Amino acid sequence: MIRINLLPHREQARKDRRQQFISLAVLMVIAGGLIWFLGNILIGQRIDTQVSSNEFLKSEIASLDKEIAEIARLKEQTQSLLARKQVIESLQGNRTQTVMVFNELVRQMPEGVFLKSVKQTGGGINFTGYAQSNARVSQLMRNLDASPIFEKPLLQEIKAVSYNRRQVGEFNLNVSIEKPTVEEPAVKVGPATASAPAGGKP
């Protein structure tokens, strides 16, 4: 039996093409949405990974900063200890010289002169004391200049004062020594102590 399609074939063809276009458009929208979703997931994962890496780097940098601060503190402590060590070594090296200086000072002290204070600073010593006369001070300076330890005595001041109801000269004298030493505190010498090596009181 022969069947004859009485519907217009052109209209049917247009409907088919329209249906195909709609189906293709829907597929493209679905594919685009899927691609966007997958891309968003991948980008989010990348961002999360980068954020995690940044946080790790920040943590490591903070740890390194602490270590650097600790190293700097240890360096400061090391330098302080080295400085103390050098001072101790210097004091130990100058201990014998200090004894020699005071022994020589006792030997060179003329009669009629006694010291009130002795202060050693670097390579020099400052004396303050009393003398029966200016001649006694001159004799002290000559003795110091002739000493193998002392040199370049320089009188800073001498003035007449009253001491124990007697008129004496109060002098201030600087003298150099051969090798610089660490600064020593002023040593107070009382009249009773100084009078024995000096040979008498003014």
Image (cartoon, grey):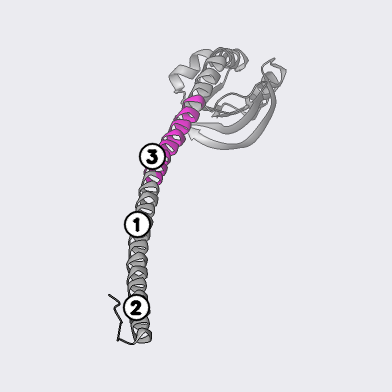
* Magenta-colored segment: predominant secondary structure: helix
Residue 137 is situated, as x and y percent measured from the top left of the image, at 63, 26
The residue at which mark 3 appears reads as 63
Please tell me whether mark 3 sits on a helix, a strand or a loop: helix
Asked whether residue 166 is drawn in magenta, I would say no
Q: Is residue 186 visible in this depiction of the protein?
A: no
Q: Residues within 10 Å of mark 2 (few under 14, many from 20)?
A: few
Compared with 125, 23 (above or below) is below
Q: Amino acid at mark 3?
A: Ser
Q: Is residue 112 visible in this depiction of the protein?
A: yes
Residue at 58% x, 33% y: name it: 171
* Quadrant including the N terminus: bottom left
Count of numbered tags: 3
**Which mark's residue is nearer the viewer, 2 or 3?**
2
Q: Nearer the viewer, residue 173 or 97?
A: 97
Between discs 2 and 1, the one toward the N terminus? 2
Q: Which residues are magenta?
A: 57-82
Residue 63 left/right relative to 78 = left
The residue at which mark 2 appears reads as 16
Residue at 52% x, 15% y: name it: 92
Between discs 1 and 3, the one toward the N terminus? 1
Q: Are marks 1 and 3 in contact (CB under 8 Å)?
A: no
Q: Amino acid at mark 2?
A: Asp
Residue 60 is situated, as x and y percent measured from the top left of the image, at 40, 41
Residue at 58% x, 38% y: name it: 159
Residue 86 is situated, as x and y percent measured from the top left of the image, at 53, 23
The CA span between labels 2 and 3 is 70 Å
The residue at which mark 1 appears reads as 44
